[in-house]
Image (tube, rainbow, N blue to C red):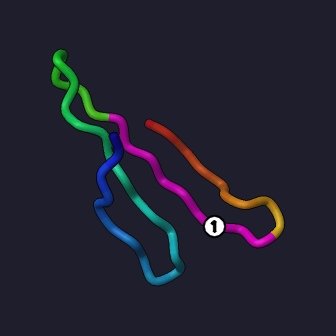
Amino acid sequence: MMYPFMTLNDDMEITHSEVKPDGSVKVFVEMPDERDGFHSAVC
């Protein structure tokens, strides 16, 4: 499950996963785009 963290003024959204057993967290950064849907990055 992904949890919302922040929405910036330009509609970029940052979400994160729950803390995994090894202590890591996935962070997703998504920017809506009318033509392509979304541009995203995962770290």
12 vs 18, left or right, is right
38 vs 34, left or right, is left
Q: Which residue is drawn at 59% across and 64% down?
A: 31
Task: Please tell me which residue lies in front, 19 or 10.
Answer: 19
Q: Does the magenta stretch include residue 37?
A: no
Q: Main secondary structure of the magenta part?
A: strand
Above or below residue 38? Residue 23 is above
Q: What is the number of callouts on the image?
A: 1
Q: Is residue 27 magenta?
A: yes
Residue type at mark 1? Answer: Pro
Q: In which quarter of the image is residue 23?
A: top left
- The image shows residue 3 at horizontal and vertical percentages of 30, 52
Residue extending furthest front? Answer: 1
What kind of element bears circle 1?
strand
Above or below residue 36? Residue 8 is below
Q: Which residue is drawn at 35% across and 45% down?
A: 2
Q: What stretch is highlighted in magenta?
A: 26-34
Task: Please tell me which residue lies in front, 3 or 43.
Answer: 3
Residue extending furthest top? Answer: 22
Q: Residue at x 83, y 67 (%)?
A: 35
Dot 1 corresponds to which residue? 32
Q: Which residue is drawn at 53% across and 80% down?
A: 10
- The image shows residue 21 at horizontal and vertical percentages of 16, 17
Above or below residue 22? Residue 42 is below
38 vs 35, left or right, is left
Q: How crowded is mark 1: few (under 14 residues within 10 Å), some or many (20 or more)?
A: some
Q: In which quarter of the image is residue 34?
A: bottom right
- The image shows residue 18 at horizontal and vertical percentages of 23, 37
25 vs 19, left or right, is right
Residue extending furthest right? Answer: 35
